[in-house]
Amino acid sequence: MYSKISFGSSAGGAAQYNEEGLSKAQKAQKSGKTELLKINNLLSTDHKGIAAEMTYNAALSRSKKPVWNISMSAPEGIRLSDEQWKTAAELNLKALGAVPERFQYAIWRHSDTKNDHIHILLNAVPIDEGAALKRYHTGIKLKQAAPIIEQALQFNAPTQGKGLGIRETIAEVLNSTFRENKPTTIGELVADLEKKGIVSNVKSNDNGPYGINFKIGENKPVKGSAIELEGGGTAKWSNLDSLLSANRAYEGLKQEQAAALATAPPIVPTTSKEGPKIAVQSPTPTVVAKPTVTPTTPTIEPVRQQPQPPTLSERFKKTYGIEATSKQIEALEAGKRLNFSQIGRVVSLQDGKLRSELIVKSIPETALKTLPTTPPTGQKAAAGAAVDKLPAAPTPAPTGQKA
């Protein structure tokens, strides 16, 4: 079962295509037809009335693209009854969160191509004035619903074509590789999968690997997060890394056990009145028991990220309260001393640490030459004359006499 979804702001064009969706040649030859299978929470049965009702209800929401048009196609050579198509459509809508009690939708069946298919026009705004449906991961939700629909309708999808069956094939090969080969590194896993016809693409950045996808032949790559693992969860990078780590730990235990057995003292036979006995020289070696948890289905724990040391840019901002440009940071790392007038300091990087000095503003020599060393002659004479005109201080009277 193959499904495709698109989004729009108006229901008119989609409704008209779903009702009249035949080419001019088909209409002229009267080959192929469309049929309205079901309406839900709607009164109209023609495309204009259906579009008008949906538009009126969608106006109550701020959603910019409330019209969802979903096409569903059966594998070539398989034709479904009208009731089977209604069941398939409702399972798809349920996967998207559109329960029949709250949403408007109409289902048309087309017979204008080799593949039996239907079109679903859905108003993502509920009739109870609740929040509109979100468009997040709708493609993944439809892919996950495909095997559920196939099981409900009791038919098997083909193994090739438009990505159908590719996801399941990759999952089976990946899980069998962990069971049989027990890879301990990503390199071993990639090599084992390549031998089985699956190409792996590991995405990395400065912090190491962070994502992975898989590809078979000329088909489109499938993200690891879309592949199911036997032990639960998906084949996203963090889960695969945990499985590889568990396999490494298991291999380490086996090597320790083998080493302990290799260094164990020999068994020496002895005799007594009771008959021959087997004596073991001490000390008795400690044998590491095989872990009870199989390495293929370990408990997946979240990978804890080690805290990263602050960058030079972050340290600079924390120390001086301003941000330095990338060129300034590069200059500091190159050992240069930079003048930051905003903080009045000269900053440099010494032995990995930020150092700074106050900026001392000196007086230019040209300005020093213009400063007078002694007051002008006229000013000095005027000052002396002013002093001569001051009255003399009175002579203090002898003790005991009135002044």
Image (cartoon, helix red, strand yellow):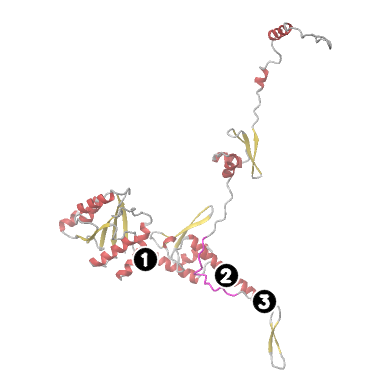
Nearest the camera: 381 or 332? 381
Q: Which residues are magenta?
A: 289-302
Relative horizontal placement of residue 297, taking residue 376 as reference (left or right): left
Q: Position of residue 399 (x, y in %)?
A: 84, 12
Q: Quadrant of residue 165?
A: bottom left
Q: How far apart, in angstroms, are the residues tagged by discs 3 and 1?
A: 52 Å
Cβ–Cβ under 8 Å for marks 2 and 3? no
For the point 26% across and 51% down, the residue is 57
Q: Residue at x 71, y 16 (%)?
A: 373
**Which numbered dot is residue 165?**
1
Q: Is residue 136 left or right of residue 296?
A: left
Q: Secondary structure at mark 2?
A: helix
Q: Amino acid at mark 2?
A: Glu
Q: Which residue is mark 3?
A: 285
Label 3: state its secondary structure: loop
In the image shown, does 329 or 214 lie closer to the viewer?
Answer: 329
Q: Where residue 344 appears, x then y in whole percent?
A: 61, 33
Residue 176's place in the image compared with 316, above or below, is below
Give me the residue at 59% from left, 71% from top: 253
Residue 294 is inside the magenta segment: yes
Q: If you read the primary sequence from the N terminus, does the residue marked by circle 1 or circle 2 appear first?
A: 1
Tag 3 or tag 2, which sits nearer the N-term? Answer: 2
Amino acid found under the numbered disc labelled 1: Gly
Quadrant including the C terminus: top right
Distance (Cα) linking label 1 and label 2: 34 Å
Q: Residue at x 54, y 41 (%)?
A: 326
Residue position marked by numbered label 2 in the rendering: 251
Q: Amino acid at mark 3?
A: Pro
